[in-house]
Image: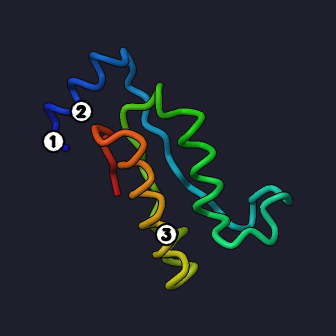
Amino acid sequence: MDYKGLYNNIKRKRSFLCIGLDTNPALLPSFMEGVRYPLFEYNKAIIDATHHLAVAYKPNLAFYEAEGHIGWLQFEMTVNYIREKDPTMFIIA
């Protein structure tokens, strides 16, 4: 997406909301223990609850990088889910 698409989303949703996905594994709720992809599942719940309000998402790469290969996989899963949920969503990464 380019800035024109972002501008159109701002007008359409009447919002400037950018959701930071700063998902720190150490701070995840206890019910996420044992979940195969906890960063992704936590992000997915946030995306599901906010996609109708947000015009952008900003996943914080540092949290994914710190988890190595599995972190990068969850980052990709998160970005793909955002695009699947709303192809017009602006993603800052």
Q: Residue at x 40, y 57 (%)?
A: 79
Q: Are marks 1 and 2 in contact (CB under 8 Å)?
A: yes
Check residue 6 in the rendering and tell me which mark sits there, or answer none: 2
Q: Residue furthest front?
A: 84
Q: Residues within 10 Å of mark 3 (few under 14, many from 20)?
A: few
For badge 3, the amino acid type reads Ala
Check residue 60 in the rendering and tell me which mark sits there, or answer none: none
Q: Residue furthest right?
A: 30
Q: Nearer the viewer, mark 3 or mark 2?
A: 2
For badge 2, the amino acid type reads Leu
Q: Residues within 10 Å of mark 1 (few under 14, many from 20)?
A: few
Q: Secondary structure at mark 3?
A: helix
Measured from the top left, where is residue 82 in percent x and y?
Answer: 42, 48
Instruction: Look at the image and tell me in which quarter the N terminus lies.
Output: top left
Q: What residue would you read off at disc 1?
A: 2
For badge 1, the amino acid type reads Asp
Q: Is residue 1 left or right of residue 40?
A: left
Q: Earlier in the sequence, mark 3 or mark 2?
A: 2
Check residue 62 in the rendering and tell me which mark sits there, or answer none: 3
